[in-house]
Image (spheres, rainbow, N blue to C red):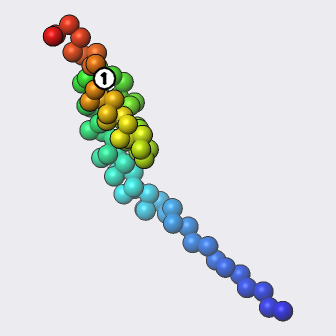
Amino acid sequence: METTTVETTSYYHPIGIIPILIILALAVIPYWKIWSRTGHSGAWSLLMLVPLANLISLWVLAFKEWPAMRGRQ
């Protein structure tokens, strides 16, 4: 009986991770600025990386009272 071995290839090579990190930063930074300008914590922007949570957080942003706008209306 012959045994076979399977070599696994790592897809997480350091050169491959750099473009992924750049794309993630490009996705989060604008939302961080938007959340911060509305008076909320910029950490809300990290939800942009979570499927379905990103849609919910945008709805919260759209319809929740903004702390930065309190007293202006």
Q: Is 1 left, or right, of 35 in this rendering?
A: right
In the picture shown, does residue 52 fall above or below 14? Answer: above
Q: Residue at x 64, y 77 (%)?
A: 7
Q: Residue at x 39, y 55 (%)?
A: 20
- Residue 30 placed where, x, y %? 26, 38
In the depicted view, which residue is nearer to us: 41 or 10? 41
In the picture shown, does residue 35 fall above or below 53? Answer: above
Residue 53, image quadrant: top left
Q: Residue at x 51, y 66 (%)?
A: 11
Q: Residue furthest left?
A: 73
- Residue 35 placed where, x, y %? 30, 28
Residue 42, image quadrant: top left
- Residue 66 placed where, x, y %? 27, 19
Q: Residue furthest right?
A: 1
Q: Quadrant of the N terminus?
A: bottom right
- Residue 37 placed where, x, y %? 24, 24
Which residue is the site of mark 1? 64
Residue 73, image quadrant: top left
Query: How many discs mark residues in the rendered view?
Result: 1
Element carrying mark 1 = loop
In the depicted view, which residue is nearer to us: 4 or 65? 65
Q: Amino acid at mark 1?
A: Lys
In the picture shown, does residue 17 fall above or below 57? Answer: below
Q: Residue at x 25, y 23 (%)?
A: 38
In the picture shown, does residue 15 fall above or below 7? Answer: above
Task: Categorize mark 1 by other alpha carbons within 10 Å: few (<14), some (14-19), many (20+).
Answer: few
Q: Residue furthest bottom?
A: 1
